[in-house]
């Protein structure tokens, strides 16, 4: 693909700060996407992580423990999340991954997409690891956005990431394919 990528091998991460344009994207509409090359998929690995040190605010897009994608956001009472089916991602293959989350409390308003190579982007099937949120979104305004890991280096994405993007609106499939 000729992608210029950043390799993540363990404790490294990118600290994006917490500029006001990054703050509190949820509970409003949010879209995120990237190209990823996963070399190990059996650990929790953070792609996007905007949470505090005790995980009581913010949101994250994570490689879950079964080579799948997991989006979660912190709510006052019960967090909202959705996880793609087991083995949704292939190891050692460039994959375009994206998520959208509409401003609601229901997990069915979270959509996770992927495509490998030149295939069209498609919504992934989902596992039973889902949960509706309860309560208001817990502000992440004081939290830093990290790429490739959690703030403490404890949940590394293992592989390479490229062309990461975040929008404060829902992107259509056509827009993501551009």
Image (cartoon, helix red, strand yellow):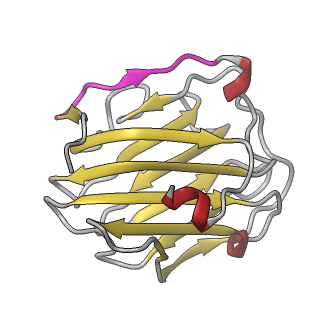
Q: Which residues are magenta?
A: 9-18
- Residue closest to the eye, 62 or 160: 160
Q: Residue at x 69, y 71 (%)?
A: 107
Marks counted in the figure total 0
The kind of secondary structure the magenta stretch mainly shows is: loop
Residue furthest front in the image: 178
- Rendered position, 161 above or below 72: above
Q: Whole-percent x and y of residue 123?
A: 51, 76
Expressed as whole percent of the image width and height from the top left, the position of residue 37 reads 23, 51
**In this rendering, position of residue 160 left or right of residue 103:** left
Q: Residue at x 36, y 35 (%)?
A: 149
The residue lying furthest to the right in this view is 136
Residue 145 lies, with reference to residue 173, above or below; the image says above
Residue in the picture at 59% in, 40% down: 166
Q: Position of residue 57 (x, y in %)?
A: 67, 37
Q: For this view, does 109 lie left or right of residue 66?
A: right
Q: Position of residue 38 (x, y in %)?
A: 22, 54
Q: Is residue 79 above or below residue 9?
A: below
User: Residue drawn at (28%, 76%), measured in percent from left and top?
Assistant: 87
Left or right: 96, with 178 as reference point: left
Q: Per the image, is 160 magenta?
A: no
Q: Is residue 11 left or right of residue 13?
A: left
Position of residue 158 relative to residue 171, above or below, is above
Which quadrant of the figure has residue 116? bottom left
Q: Is residue 13 on the magenta stretch?
A: yes
């Amino acid at each position: 693909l000729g992608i210029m990528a950043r390799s993540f091998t363990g404790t490294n991460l990118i600290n994006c700060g917490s500029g006001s344009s990054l703050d509190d994207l949820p509970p409003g509409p949010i879209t995120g996407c990237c190209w990823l090359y996963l070399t190990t998929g059996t650990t929790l690995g953070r792609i996007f992580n905007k949470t505090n040190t005790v995980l009581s605010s913010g949101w994250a897009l994570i490689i879950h423990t079964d080579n799948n994608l997991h989006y979660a956001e912190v709510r006052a009472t019960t967090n909202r999340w959705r996880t793609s089916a087991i083995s949704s991602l292939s190891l050692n293959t460039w994959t375009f991954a994206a998520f959208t989350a509409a401003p609601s409390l229901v997990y069915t308003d979270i959509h996770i997409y992927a495509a490998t190579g030149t295939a069209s982007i498609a919504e992934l099937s989902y596992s039973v690891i889902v949960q509706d949120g309860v309560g208001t979104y817990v502000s992440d305004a004081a939290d830093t956005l990290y790429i490739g890991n959690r703030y403490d280096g404890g949940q590394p994405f293992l592989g390479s990431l490229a062309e990461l993007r975040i929008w404060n609106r829902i992107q259509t499939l056509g827009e993501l394919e551009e």
